[in-house]
Amino acid sequence: MEKRKMLKVVSSAMALTMLLAGCSSASNKTGGSKSAVEFKTSVDNGGTAVSNGKLKVGILSSDPLTGMFNPVFYLQATDLYVMEDTMTATFSTDKSYRMKQDNSDDPVMFHMDRDKKEVTLTVNKDLKWSNGKDVTADDIIATYNLMGNPKYSDNVRYSDEFEVIEGMKEYHDGKASSISGISKKDDKTVVIKYKEIKPALLWGTGFITTFLNKDQVEAASKDFTKFSEAELNTKPLSYGPYYFDKVVNGESVLAKANPHFYKKDDVKVKEIEYKVISPAQASAAIKNGDVDYMKAITTGVYDSIKDAKNGTVLGQPDFYMSYVGFKLGKFDKETGKNVVDPNAKAADVRVRQAFGYAVDWDQINEKVFKGLRFTATDSGLYPPRVEIFHNKDGKKFTKDTEKAKKLLDEAGLKDTDGDGLREDKNGKKLTFNFAIRNTGQDFDQTLADTFIKSWKEVGLDVKLVDGKLMAPKDWSRRVTADDPSIDIFQGAWGLGTDPNPSELVGTTAPLNYTRYTSDTLNKDLAALSTQEMFDDNKLKEAYKKFDSDYANEIPWLPFSWTNEMTWINKRIKNIDIAKLSLGEMKLYQLELTSDDSAKG
């Protein structure tokens, strides 16, 4: 599941798609949606803190760490897990995950002047690298130079989002020796001039939120064929609460308290050990006390540890949604636009509605996913994690086979040969080819069979592409290439914090896998980038309109939202994962109440 910058892109090489849909009429069930299994976000285990405990953090993954420990240019989410609480968190955010302005307590203070179209970054006077040297304006400029460096051809982080900075495109195209819009005011201050200041900037769009050491950047930039081997990535300097002391390739990282951290007296945990743990080993590792803290616990792991006596599973809604999408057109590479096909099998919105009403979405989430997932509402793009955009009274599809049959009749899809399956408007056999992945979970086939059976009950003939579940790489290749043998598909997206979905559903978005666009949605998306969006009331109105319009047009059917589950060992004295995610509590502030982790 790839995390994109939708609700700040924490983009990684995890996996794939995003689509959704919603409900189309007032007759859809309202009242929102919530998980059948409810979680607390905090726990207070009590006890007296010890002074030299080592926090053991588990990274749940079948893949090893890549060792690309660069907080800006990392390639895999597991590497980010090691960095996010040790080296990053430069700017504080509000409850909507927008950067706060003029917070002099931050490592770097952020100030935006909309009239001048400028952002001023002021480095905290006490901020130092882990080698004891001051963090300066030159470090910030060097990071932006690396982002736009035309010789860094393997840079997956650069996008046209950064070209809203004056001179960035010219620099990236090799037509200028520097970025004209970025200037050094003094040793601690950088001014960035923008062609346009958009609300998305506050979520980090067109902006770098962590900075690299100038000397390490310059050394790494001498030969990009050996970039991954450079100390910038293998032994990065840190201005965060920790630095990397020992790395066991692919397996673990030992982070020690940075003696030069500007808030070193606040650091309670002096060492953190990060270790990759496979899903098959996770349950035993947790019960044996090999792990104190583990995020992103899967359904299977949760099932085996939910009653463990040596800790607690905390949870909160995740930045995640899954969906069933319709192929409604193709991406035209020449024009760079998604083009709707009026002859697509599900081109009639009534057909798409019928697909939605044929399925008992709540039952699937409660039974197949054991109540840990819950039915997404409206467009599905705004789960409950961010209150400002989530519609707690959102609409969702509920099973209504008679309504589904009526809609299909109205669309001209009728059973003309008496076999129980509907033909198309012209009386010809109609089969929808369904692409769904084999993710390695024991419920994959059950999920596919449930969908197909539900659709067959209303006369829709749906078959798996090639008659089987698809390998993830094959699914990705064929869905992105608009393979004509695919009519509907099931996938999922990890969402970021920027709520503007243009890169996922826009006319020019390659990631708009349904290939659906409309004048209404284009107007909605354009409105989300206007200056009026700096007004929170107008912001909420505009997103609510987009959310509703997208749901009404149904390019996809929203399937699941899920919970981000975190294991907490009993020796962690007090923790609140909601506050951790907002930066109101820091991992380095945790206290441990024993030298050894509790076993259970």
Image (tube, rainbow, N blue to C red):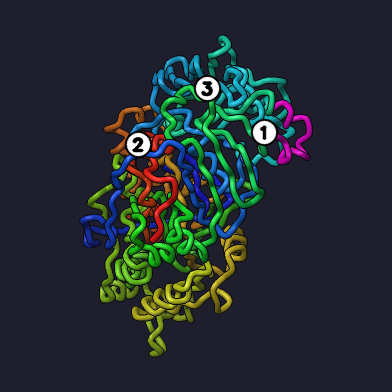
Under circle 2, the secondary element is loop
Q: Is residue 352 left or right of residue 537?
A: right
Observer-side mark, 1 or 2, equals 1
Relative to 225, is 518 above or below? below
Kind of residue at badge 1: Leu
Q: Position of residue 197 (x, y in %)?
A: 46, 25
Magenta range is: 217-231
Instruction: Give residue 96's mark.
Output: 2
The residue under label 3 is: 194
Residue appearing at x 40%, y 41% in the figure: 499
Q: Is residue 389 left or right of residue 439?
A: left
* Residue reaching furthest to the top: 186
Q: Tell me if residue 227 is in the magenta stretch.
A: yes
The residue under label 1 is: 232
Q: Earlier in the sequence, mark 3 or mark 2?
A: 2
Q: How would you rate the neighbour count of disc 1 (Cα within 10 Å): few for under 14, some for 14-19, many for 20 or more? A: many
